């Protein structure tokens, strides 16, 4: 896993891992040991599971938003490259220079 320069994202990644492990343990225990449908513990377990799922979803959203803003596309196949926007790679700085055939200053 890549180290995060943003401590908030790093915290969310740790929380995501921790909450997923806790959710797995709760659900495994629930099915392994079994629960009586009318028990108070069942209600508490359901609340805990719902809370963990909410926290997991929140962390996933924060991480996904960060990844969308900061990650570069990893695909280098022709299909991936053709779908991307290449306008910022253009050596011409604006449409007027492109029409007149002028190059940006400092270029030979």
Image (tube, rainbow, N blue to C red):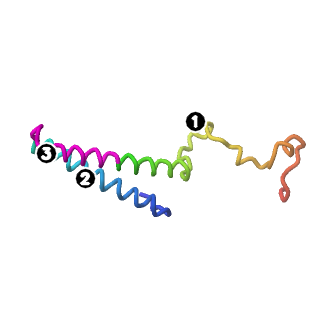
Q: Residue at x 38, y 46 (%)?
A: 57
Disc 1 target residue? 79
Count residues near mark 2 (Cα–Cα under 10 Å), then give few for <14, some for 14-19, many for 20+. some
Q: Closer to the observer: label 1 or label 3?
A: 3
Q: Residue at x 62, y 40 (%)?
A: 84
Toward which corner of the image does residue 14 lie, by quadrant?
Answer: bottom left
Per the image, label 1 sits on a secondary structure element best described as helix
Count residues near mark 3 (Cα–Cα under 10 Å), then give few for <14, some for 14-19, many for 20+. few
Query: Mark 1 touching mark 2, by CB under 8 A?
Result: no
Q: Residue at x 41, y 48 (%)?
A: 60
Tag 3 or tag 2, which sits nearer the N-term? 2
Per the image, label 2 sits on a secondary structure element best described as helix
Q: Nearer the viewer, residue 28 or 108?
A: 28
Q: Position of residue 85 (x, y in %)?
A: 65, 41
Magenta stretch: includes residue 53: yes
Q: Which mark is residue 22?
A: 2
Q: Closer to the observer: label 2 or label 3?
A: 3
Q: Nearer the viewer, residue 105 or 39?
A: 39
Q: Position of residue 98 (x, y in %)?
A: 84, 43
Disc 3 target residue? 40
Residue extent of the magenta highlight: 35-54
Tag 2 or tag 1, which sits nearer the N-term? 2
Alpha carbons under labels 1 and 2: distance apart: 40 Å
Residue at the outermost right position: 100
Query: Mark 2 touching mark 3, by CB under 8 A?
Result: no
Quadrant location of the N terminus in the rendered image:
bottom left
Tag 3 or tag 1, which sits nearer the N-term? 3
Magenta stretch: includes residue 46: yes
């Amino acid at each position: 896993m890549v180290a995060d320069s943003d401590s908030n994202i790093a915290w969310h990644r740790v929380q995501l891992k921790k909450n997923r492990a806790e959710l797995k343990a709760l659900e495994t225990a629930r099915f392994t040991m079994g629960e009586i449908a009318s028990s108070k513990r069942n209600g508490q377990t359901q609340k805990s599971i719902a809370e963990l799922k909410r926290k997991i979803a929140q962390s996933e959203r924060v991480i996904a938003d960060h990844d969308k803003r900061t990650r570069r596309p990893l695909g280098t196949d022709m299909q991936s490259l053709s779908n991307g926007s290449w306008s910022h790679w253009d050596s011409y700085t604006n449409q007027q220079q492109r029409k007149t055939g002028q190059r940006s200053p400092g270029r030979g």
